[in-house]
Amino acid sequence: MFSALARLAPVALRRSFSTSAQNNAKVAVPGASGGIGQPLALLKNSPLVSGLTLYDIAHTPGVAADLSHIETRAHCLKVVVIPAGIPRKPGMTRDDLFNTNACIVATLSVACAQHCPEAIIISNPVNSTIPITTEVFKKHEIYNPNKIFGVTTLDIVRANTFIAELKGLDPAQVNVPVFGGHAGKTIIPLISQCTAQVDIPQDQLTAITGQIQEAGTEVVKAKAGAALATLSMAYTGARFVFSLVDAMNGKEGVVECSFVKSPEADCAYFSTPLLLGKKGIEKNLGIGKISPFGEKMIAEAIPELKASIKKGEEFVKNMK
């Protein structure tokens, strides 16, 4: 798989590079034939997207033909979304998938560095793979920390959904910032900072925090190992792309949480709310005021985040 990606990725990205109007975004989706990539390719339906390039090692022409029947205008590559990788099986952790998915992300990162170095990169999974993209870009001497994002939006959407259900609220009025990373206890929903003020007893708070952290495992089990969370991940990936493109087009006040290079915690990367702008991150809004429960979650997450980050950095250091 690694060698096939290495051969095809640069070609796919070269072909997708063209000029477009300033306020039009051309988006590339590596891994477009997968369970997340196919629904994510419905980005074609957005008026913000002037062009969509699909890439995978198999079945890509079929996905492209399918999409070509949708009546939209989408035919400079500004955004690359990487949902590529293999899914988890029951009993597997994200760490079990590291070597395969690390190879995929590293290969695609090299292709981006060589053929669209100015593009903004959005990737999932994140705890180890965002450090991989960073280190690849550093090797190519084009690293810009404001342009590499790890998508943690799925955890926010899940938190919003579960809190709204628990409290009988409209989910559209609920926004729970989720800090940390995107795996197990590194997922830190700060419900105390929810836009809709909610009063949740500690026992319920502990339970719903665990529900948010283990929601991905719940989906894998419910699908009997056939797939991971694909539709919800594609939805949240698209949501992040739309927010980013809006900000790139000049919309003010666009805020999303994302796993990025950050000085906000005792580890090199950490997800916090970010003010997005024309060139990526405009300002890291930081952690803000947190409860003792939130402080405890952050303290427990840091060792795991540090280990994952180091693993990603070491992978690139040892690449041939």
Image: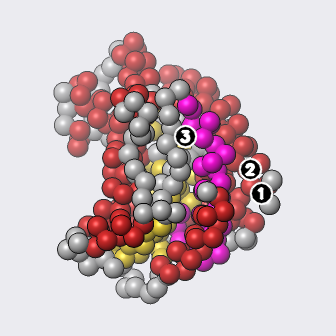
Residue 92 placement, left or right of 161: right
Specify the quadrant of the image occupied by residue 200: top left
Reading the image, the residue beneath label 2 is 315
Reading the image, the residue beneath label 3 is 181
Q: For this rendering, which residue is in front, 20 or 168?
A: 20
Residue 240 placement, left or right of 120: left
Q: Is residue 119 magenta?
A: yes
Sequence-first tag of 1 and 3: 3
Where is the C terminus found, in terms of image quarters?
Answer: bottom right
Would residue 1 be seen by someone viewing this image from the given angle? yes
Q: Tell me the tag on residue 173.
A: none
Measuring from the top left, give residue 87's x and y in whole percent: 49, 42
Residue 118 placement, left or right of 208: right
Residue type (three-letter) at the residue carrying disc 3: Gly
Specify the quadrant of the image occupied by residue 103: bottom right
Q: Is residue 229 above or below residue 247?
A: above
Q: Is residue 100 magenta?
A: yes
Residue at coordinates 65% horizontally, 75% vertically from top-left? 114
Magenta-highlighted stretch: main secondary structure? helix
Residue at coordinates 42% horizontally, 59% vertically from top-left? 33
Residue 111 placement, left or right of 56: right
Measuring from the top left, give residue 187's x and y in whole percent: 50, 34
Measuring from the top left, give residue 225's x and y in whole percent: 44, 33
Residue type (three-letter) at the residue carrying disc 2: Phe
Would residue 255 be seen by someone viewing this image from the given angle? no
Please provide the residue range marked out in magenta: 92-121
